[in-house]
Image (spheres, helix red, strand yellow):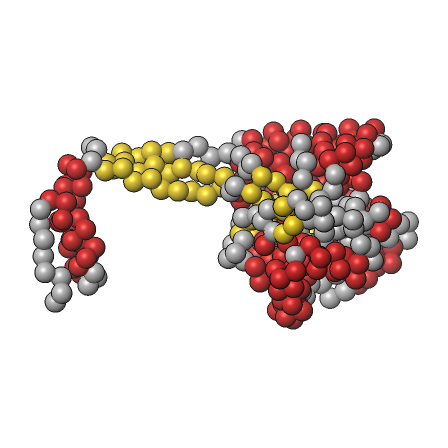
């Protein structure tokens, strides 16, 4: 019964499949045609010249540049501590298993370009990939008509600040298809395919990631943004309303959910919403989101029930604005990210907390994590046994192989010790 934004990816899959097939067959020419059709601009090339990245950075407002630098610095500090180290376990004398953490070789990082511009998403994708040790990074963002068929200058500036020199001016399903299959640019330069695509996007990007999953790795199927706030009578209704509005600003389908033990707070928040929405820039978009079936207020008898409700909802962003907020937050099992107390709003996490804002949506926080260094690492087990170590377990291997009716498995061990059997029976 909890409100939930609807996103029917299945309905879009068959719409994007022909686009993916076309990009695989015709490459960049198909990509440029789709850019002309969907973004109303035809780029001269897919890859943005590195000189354009430097120029965009030089032209960036100093205050915005300083804010991006702060965001990068804090994100790097948090993500540097996530890097796993290789571990070797001595199972028996002469027998070890080492788990090596190896980064994905080449990754495509998608930065949306729809109702807003998201240089912060460039930061959130690039920083953990770099911390993981990914060597090949491509930032992909839709071409903008007002910028001559290149991505928004702030996207280019963020890439330059992060040391990424490969940016592609392509968006939508065709971007994911080109990242997966690669191609040849208009100047004859190779656009190498990637091993993995991460980053949020619209339903067409999500559908393309679903279709191409397997050929490429993906982080998740991102849905519409959502915020849930668990609050009691101690919460400030002005703060709660402002935070609900902040996420409703993203999209008319964005979800804003208040879970509270206090009817008085619920009424006060409703009154604040009426006042505050009228003063916002994107008031129509926000009103649509707040009045949609995906948004609402849920009254609960006590905080125990409140925790059960927010765990069932598994919000992308969960704020705890209650008495003893840290203790309540520690009881939460399901959330993409948890924001504790009156001075940790979701907006802080969107930009400068140091945490990552690419998070699971649509209830996927019940089983999935947000983007992190681990996203870009693969664990590889390295098995190293000596002759004596293998001899010590040979009989057990043979016994299990024969129990599973796979005698050749056992023979592969027995043969090393001069034992051969007729395996034809």
What residue is at 11 percent from the left and 44 percent from the top? 417
Quarter holding residue 298: bottom right
* Residue 118 shown left or right of residue 417 in the figure: right
Q: Position of residue 277 (x, y in %)?
A: 86, 53
What residue is at 13 percent from the left and 65 percent from the top? 424
Q: Nearer the viewer, residue 9 or 185?
A: 185
Quarter holding residue 176: bottom right
Q: Position of residue 326 (x, y in %)?
A: 60, 39
* Residue 423 shown left or right of residue 141 in the figure: left
What residue is at 15 percent from the left and 36 percent from the top? 388
Q: Position of residue 62 (x, y in %)?
A: 83, 28
Pick the quarter of the image with the N terminus. bottom right
* Residue 351 shown left or right of residue 115 in the figure: left
* Extreme residue toward the right, this view: 279
Q: How many marks?
A: 0
Q: Nearer the viewer, residue 56 or 392?
A: 56
Q: Position of residue 72 (x, y in %)?
A: 68, 32
* Extreme residue toward the front, this view: 188
- Position above or below: 290 against 87: below
């Amino acid at each position: 019964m909890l409100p939930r934004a609807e996103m029917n990816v299945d309905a879009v899959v068959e719409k994007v499949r022909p686009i993916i097939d076309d990009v695989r067959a015709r490459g960049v020419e198909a990509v440029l045609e789709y850019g002309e059709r969907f973004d109303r601009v035809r780029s001269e090339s897919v890859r943005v010249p590195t000189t354009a990245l430097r120029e965009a950075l030089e032209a960036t407002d100093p205050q915005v540049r300083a804010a991006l630098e702060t965001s990068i610095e804090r994100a790097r500090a948090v993500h540097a501590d996530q890097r796993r180290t290789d571990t070797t376990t001595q199972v028996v004398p002469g027998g070890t298993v080492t788990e090596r953490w190896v980064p994905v070789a080449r990754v495509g990082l998608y930065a949306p370009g729809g109702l807003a511009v998201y240089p912060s998403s460039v930061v959130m994708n690039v920083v953990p990939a770099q911390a993981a040790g990914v060597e090949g990074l491509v930032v992909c963002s839709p071409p903008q008509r007002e910028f001559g068929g290149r991505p928004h200058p702030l996207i280019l500036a963020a890439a330059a600040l992060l040391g990424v020199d490969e940016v592609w001016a392509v968006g939508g399903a065709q971007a994911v298809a080109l990242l997966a299959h690669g191609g040849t640019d208009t100047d004859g330069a190779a656009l190498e395919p990637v091993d993995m695509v991460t980053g949020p996007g619209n339903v067409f990007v999500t559908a393309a990631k679903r279709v191409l999953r397997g050929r490429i790795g993906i982080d998740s199927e991102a849905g519409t943004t959502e915020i849930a706030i668990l609050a009691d009578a101690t919460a400030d209704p002005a703060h709660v309303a402002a935070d609900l509005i902040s996420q409703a600003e993203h999209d008319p389908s964005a979800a804003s959910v208040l879970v509270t033990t206090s009817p008085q707070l619920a009424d006060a928040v409703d009154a604040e919403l009426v006042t505050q929405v009228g003063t916002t820039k994107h008031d129509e978009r926000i009103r649509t989101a707040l009045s949609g079936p995906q948004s609402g207020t849920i009254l609960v008898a006590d905080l125990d029930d409140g925790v059960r409700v927010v765990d069932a909802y598994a919000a992308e962003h969960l704020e705890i604005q209650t008495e003893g907020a840290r203790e309540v937050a520690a009881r939460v099992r399901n959330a993409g990210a948890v924001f504790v107390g009156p001075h940790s709003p979701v907006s802080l996490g969107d930009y400068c907390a140091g945490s990552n804002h690419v998070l699971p949506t649509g209830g996927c926080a019940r089983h999935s994590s947000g983007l992190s260094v681990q996203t870009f690492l693969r664990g590889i087990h390295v098995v190293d046994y000596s002759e004596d170590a293998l001899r010590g377990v040979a009989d057990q291997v043979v016994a299990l192989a024969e129990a599973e009716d796979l005698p050749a498995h056992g023979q592969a061990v027995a043969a090393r010790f001069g034992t051969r059997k007729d395996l034809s029976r």
